[in-house]
Image (cartoon, grey):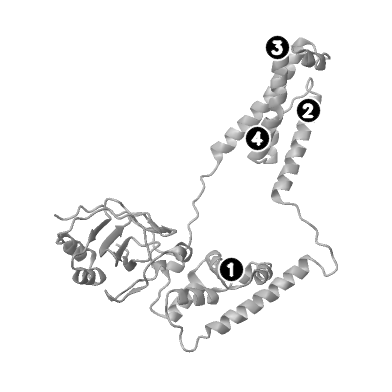
């Protein structure tokens, strides 16, 4: 019985390093140089520096200007081409390119360090963003306290002041936390009349105590309204999409299997694809993963993410040789026909990739 097909949503084309053409080194290099975003180039270069340089050299290099990492497409070409398992052209000296880049990166790192800290100047500690925010919050509450001291004649507009200052939600939270205990204290005074509070507020008449309590509550209410308005206008967080190189960094797979004469494709080709065929050489188990997401598959650790449970399938192969040939050469429809001719029962694959997994093939359909 033919498997029920599912309508495939229109998908985005592959972008970034994962879309680079691999049929020619020079085409690959030109693509990295002209079509890959500087941010992705910087990420790959920094990750390579962390893998290959000592802690001391990393500290020097990372002190350099951002453009040293963004404007290094030739280094990314070196790194990714080698990871894909291809040979460099005879006229391309990768080791020389690496050495020259590291030397220049260290030089610029030292220049920037000397600019920031003179030879005889003590290092001046800069304030962290959290310290600056705490100081601004403290100043804001000090301004409210001035209004509280003159509460009888005050026309405080805490909500408007928060808006005008463009205050972060942390400031509003701290205002609520600061004035809630005071408001609770006045409420206890009015309702329970404990001796210590009666004495502390003896300078106020009972009507004044109630008005003072309402004034404090108005500050809390204004801060709560500001929190609600910020929550309502908050932009949804855009999920960070990791590059194909980063996603495939921890994938476990079998590079080559001599028994079945199979070689795995590079796992960098998996993110963004919509169909993946894998073969477990230990249990002779074939799995076909299908994704209908616009961005295709993702990899998290050693597990494939984003595949359709209803459309993906797996089964044991009694005679794997012939069927594996089909998987490597034929179209999706032809593979589906051969799969339906198998006598073993299909099941839902679990998405895990391990050291016995051959990554057979990826497709965009």
- Write down the residue under mark 2: 147
Q: Nearer the viewer, mark 1 or mark 2?
A: 1
Q: Residue shown at 68%/23% (left/top)? A: 217
Comparing 174 with 293, the one in front is: 174
**Image position of 236 (left or right of 297):** right
Distance from disc 1 to disc 3, alpha carbons, whole Å, reads 64 Å
Please tell me whether residue 324 is drawn above or below residue 209 in the rendered image: below
Q: x, y (%) of residue 153?
A: 79, 21
Q: Which of marks 4 and 1 is in front?
A: 1
Q: Residue shown at 50%/86% (left/top)? A: 92
Under circle 2, the secondary element is helix
Q: Which residue lies furthest to the front in this view?
A: 282
Crowding at dot 2, Cα within 10 Å, few <14 / some 14-19 / many 20+, comes out as some
Question: What is the quadrant of the C terminus in the image?
Answer: bottom left
- Write down the residue under mark 1: 50
Crowding at dot 3, Cα within 10 Å, few <14 / some 14-19 / many 20+, comes out as few
Distance from disc 4 to disc 1, alpha carbons, whole Å, reads 39 Å
- Write down the residue under mark 4: 173
Comparing 357 with 142, the one in front is: 357
């Amino acid at each position: 019985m033919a498997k029920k097909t599912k309508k495939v949503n229109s998908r985005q084309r592959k972008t970034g390093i994962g879309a680079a053409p691999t049929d020619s080194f020079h085409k690959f290099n030109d693509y990295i140089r002209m079509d890959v975003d500087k941010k992705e180039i910087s990420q790959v270069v920094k990750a390579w520096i962390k893998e290959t340089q000592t802690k001391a050299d990393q500290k020097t290099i990372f002190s350099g200007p951002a453009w040293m990492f963004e404007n290094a497409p030739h280094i990314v070409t070196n790194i990714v081409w080698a990871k894909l398992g291809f040979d460099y052209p005879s006229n391309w000296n990768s080791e020389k390119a690496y050495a020259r880049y590291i030397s220049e990166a260290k030089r610029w790192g030292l220049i920037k360090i000397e600019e920031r800290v003179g030879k005889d100047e003590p290092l001046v500690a800069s304030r962290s963003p959290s310290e600056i925010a705490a100081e601004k919050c403290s100043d804001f509450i000090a301004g409210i306290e001035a209004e509280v001291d003159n509460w009888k004649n005050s026309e405080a507009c805490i909500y408007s002041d928060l808006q005008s200052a463009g205050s972060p939600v942390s400031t509003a939270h701290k205002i609520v936390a600061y004035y809630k205990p005071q408001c609770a204290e006045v409420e206890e005074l009015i309702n329970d009349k404990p001796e210590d509070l009666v004495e502390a507020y003896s300078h106020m008449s009972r009507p004044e105590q109630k008005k003072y309590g309402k004034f404090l509550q108005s500050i809390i209410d204004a801060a709560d309204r500001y929190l609600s308005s910020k929550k309502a206008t908050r932009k949804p967080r855009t999920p960070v999409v990791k590059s194909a190189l980063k996603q495939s960094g921890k994938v476990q797979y079998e590079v080559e299997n001599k028994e079945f004469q199979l070689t795995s494709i590079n796992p960098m080709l998996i993110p963004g694809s919509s169909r993946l065929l894998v073969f477990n050489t230990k249990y002779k188990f074939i799995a076909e993963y299908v994704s209908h997401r616009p961005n295709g598959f993702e990899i998290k650790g050693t597990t494939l993410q984003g595949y359709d449970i209803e459309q993906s399938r797996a089964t044991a192969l009694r005679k794997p040789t012939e069927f594996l040939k089909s998987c490597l050469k034929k179209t999706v429809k032809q593979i589906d026909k051969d799969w339906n001719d198998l006598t073993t029962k299909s099941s839902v694959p679990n998405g895990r990739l391990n050291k016995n997994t051959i990554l057979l093939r990826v497709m965009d359909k």
